[in-house]
Structure formats: C-alpha cells, structure tokens
Amino acid sequence: MLVAIGAGIAAFTGIGAGIGIGIATGKATDAVARQPEAEPKISKLLILGLALAEGTAIFGFVIALLIIMFLK
Amino acid sequence: MEGFVDRLSEELDCQTVFTIPIFSGINVSESVVVTWIIIFVLGLLCIAFVRNLKVENPGKKQVVIETMVSTIYNMIKSNVGEHGKAFIPYLMTIFIYLIFANLIGLFGFKPPTKDLNVTAALAIMSIVVIEFASIHKKGMLGRIKAFAQPTPLIAPLNILEILIRPLSLCMRLFGNILGGFVVMELLKIVIPIFIPVPFSFYFEIFDGFMQAYIFVFLTSIFIGEAVE
C-alpha cells in the first residue's frame, strides 16, 4: 500500500512542469503579440522549451513506474 | 483487473526473441531484432534513393531527398557551429534512426527506444562523442581547464554534468516513448477499434518526432559548446 502512496507522490513532479509550461506559453504569446513577424522563431523556441520542461515531469513518471515495478 | 496489470507488465518488459548459442547463450532481445529491421529498411531506402543521381537535370525524387537532407543539415549546423561540422553526419544518422525507431510502433512492432538499454546506449554514445569533440579541439589540458570555465566556483557542477547530461537525455527519451506506449496499450485494451487512431497522432507521431529532434538538438548544442 505504501508502494501506491510512493508512486502517487512521485507523480507530483507534474505540477512544476504544468506551471512552467503555462508561464512559458504566456510569455511566448506576449512576444508574438509584440512582434508578429517573429512568430516562426518564437514558436520554435516555445516547442523546444515545452519538450525540455516536459522532461522533468517524465522523470517523475519513470520513478513512479520503477517504484511500482521493483518494490513489490 | 488482474489480467490487465499482468498483460501491461508483460508488455513493458523486453522479451528475448532467440538466444545465440555462443559462450553461455547471449540473449537477443526484441529491441535488437527491431533495430535490425530498421537497419535493413533504412539500407534499402538508401540504395533505392541514390540510383541515377544527376547534377544537370535532377529528377523530382532527387530534389525532394536533397531538400530533406539539406534542411536537416542546416538545422543541426546552426547548433553545432563551424568547428563541429565533422559531427553532423553522425547526428543526422541518429536523427533518422530515432524517427524510425519511435514511429515503428505504428507498424505493429514495439519501439526499441521503449527499452532502457537502447536509450542508455544512445546517451552513452552521445557523451563519448561530446567528450571526444572537446578533447580533440582543446587537448586534454584544455578540457580540464574548461571545467573552471565561467567561474571556478561551479567546477563541481561542471564535473557532475558529465554524468547528468547523458542521464537526462536517456531518461527523457525513455520516459516519453514508454509513456506513449503505455497509454496506447491501455487504449487498445479498452477500445480496440477506432479511438486509438486520433490519440496515436499525438502520443506516437508527434511525441516521437519531438523526442528525436530534442535528443539530437541537445547533443548538438553540447557539441557546439564543447568545441567552441
């Protein structure tokens, strides 16, 4: 049962990713609103930042999976 | 519910397909077999596309292939910089391999990058290339001096980064592809017919492309920084 609680706590890393991605997207839309002709570059940077920020949330998922699989 | 969990955990583990009977039996797991299939398919594509290349009146196929190759080349070149140009073919190969490997789930095989060993091997290869690039450009002494680069205060962090960078590359690729695979398997267990298709556009296709691009992009940034 503690295994389940541990895995659940490990999934909390999603909070940081969600907040970070939200702030990044907000700033990206501000930048595009200021200078619409820079939109391709900004969206490229945004997608890059999204994938990197998502990585930390994925680390939490991997930890939860490892906890479930190896701590019977 | 029990059958559910068992079926899922059996999908997550990597089964050995056959055993080579040398020494005491080398287990060949299915990610290796799928990688062989990808190598075979890519080899066939390469042979098919380089027939009858012309300089003067290129056919449509040649123009398309040249556009694709030069797009990827310029994309990587802007990150690696001038001094790292020698590493671009390696990075392009890894990019094409990762795109095929992540998307082969669409054809019924299990993606080899779902296996932690495959992503760990790719990450170790990346770190070997980065360190080799750095030592080749700066020499052994220059590499050690580069640990103190912005300020000597963060030298321990720089030393740790040699370990942390491949770890994060490996885990990011593994986690994303495994996560997509698990979600698709769960969807297929629940509703096998039409619903998995739109979800597979995001989880398999988009995610696969993104992760391949991110892996190569980060490695090229590290190489560019190492030879700068």
Image (spheres, rainbow, N blue to C red):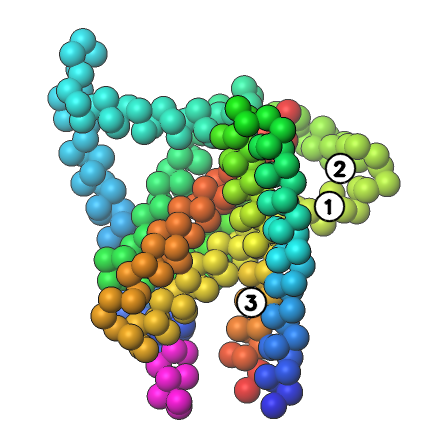
Disc 2 residue crowd, few under 14, some 14–19, many 20+, Cα 10 Å: some
- Span shown in magenta: B1-9
Disc 1 residue crowd, few under 14, some 14–19, many 20+, Cα 10 Å: few
Q: Is residue A14 visible?
A: yes
Residue found 15% across the figure and 20% down from its top: B59
Where B55 falls versus A63 (above or below)?
above
Q: Chain of mark 2?
A: B
Instruction: Indicate the position of residue B15 as horizontal and vertical percent values.
Output: 34, 72
Q: Amino acid at mark 3?
A: Phe
Residue found 60% across the figure and 45% down from its top: A25
Q: Is residue A4 magenta?
A: no
Residue with the mark numbered 1: B159
Q: CA distance from mark 2 to mark 1?
A: 7 Å
Where B228 falls versus B14 (above or below)?
above
Where A48 falls versus B4 (above or below)?
above
Say what secondary structure mark 3 lies in. helix
Instruction: Indicate the position of residue B197 as horizontal and vertical percent values.
Output: 28, 61
Residue with the mark numbered 2: B147
Residue with the mark numbered 3: A61
Of circles 1 and 3, the one toward us is 3
